[in-house]
Image (spheres, helix red, strand yellow):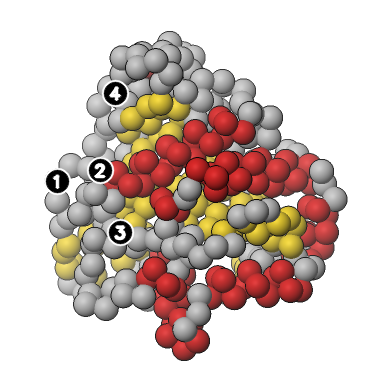
Amino acid sequence: MAGIALGTELRKDPASGRWILVLNEAPQLNLGDGCPFCPGNEAQTPPEIAAYRTNGQAPNSPEWQVRVIPERVPLLRVEGNIRREAVGMFDKVSSRGASEIVIEGPDHEASWDALPSEAVERVLWMYRDRVEDLYRDPQIRSVIIYRRERTPADRIDHPFSRIIGAPIVFDDLRSELATARQYFAYKHRCLYCDIVRQERRDGIRVVEETRHFSVYTPYGSRRPFETWVVPTTHSHSFEDLSSDEVGDLARTLQRTSSRLHAIQPSVPLEIVLHTGPNEAMQVGDDDWQSLPDDYHWHIELSPDHLVHRTIGGFAVNPVPPEAAAKQLKGAI
């Protein structure tokens, strides 16, 4: 089934400098009966982009471990070239990019908490493979991986993640890159490495330390129980993970998920992976010059309460991160 072409475009808000993805048409879908992501229903989805299989079975057959498909209603599309346009004083960019779904496994009821760690490792390897492949596209400038746990109220509650590749740098990543570059220019050190050292020194917000990762509730947490998983060895690119690090990360994410579920069992968990931008797509002469030294990939987790309190742009967090870390440490 081919993706439905929507009239989407990226518009830049001149007052805030942030990008907004505008859908000019509402998608009309009829998904039919049953779960299209379960094995045996492969014909209900677009043809797969990639998959892990045990014995080299044919593409789009039921025997798969992890499967990647184009999003049926793509927010960003791989067709065409980037078009940058001026609309008077306003700027917009065509929705050239990628919208992919990672179907994380055949088990409809699976939870990262209870899965064998090897199953979560496979998902992480697929993340890496897809980012590497998308960055071969010279028109994709940044990639973000987003996972929100499904609920019975969702139309599809089979476990899956989204991978979005964009022709611009996502606003959150752009802000992180600018702050990290400024810090490095001033101190000649990685901001995130310094934060990890400070958090370990303070101790009061650290939830767990593993061989390769530090898990903590950030000093400036924006949400209740916001938790970061940050590699303790400097790296700007998630794609550079070693096999040992992938195994450690899978187990760390499972334990962190279990802690967050124990604290708020009825709230779906949101996981966002931040990795460096596509270094091959340099726009300005000074883009990414210090990127390998100044940026640090990481994963952010938090219960998704849907309503996030803000006042005048300030995030309002009713749970101090020190109290959150104490509860999370004692949760499992």
Q: The residue under label 3 is which amino acid type?
A: Asn
What's the distance in space between the residues labelled 4 and 2, CA to CA? 15 Å
Q: Where residue 28 sits: x, y (%)?
A: 34, 30
Instruction: Tell me which residue sits at (68%, 35%) in the image.
Output: 113
Instruction: Say which residue label 2 marks.
Output: 77
What's the distance in space between the residues labelled 1 and 2, CA to CA? 8 Å
Asked if labels 2 and 1 touch by Cβ distance under 8 angstroms, the answer is yes
Q: Where residue 89 sits: x, y (%)?
A: 21, 74
Instruction: Say which residue label 3 marks.
Output: 278
Disc number lying in front (1 or 4): 4
Q: Quick check: can you spot residue 269?
A: no
In terms of secondary structure, where does tag 1 sit?
loop
Instruction: Say which residue label 4 marks.
Output: 47
What's the distance in space between the residues labelled 2 and 3, CA to CA? 17 Å
Q: The residue under label 1 is which amino acid type?
A: Gly
In the image, residue 46 sits, relative to residue 134, either above or below, namely above
Of 44 and 68, nearer the camera is 68
Of 32 and 218, nearer the camera is 218
**Is 46 positioned to the left or the right of 241 in the image?**
left
Instruction: Say which residue label 1 marks.
Output: 80
**Is 82 positioned to the left or the right of 167 in the image?**
left
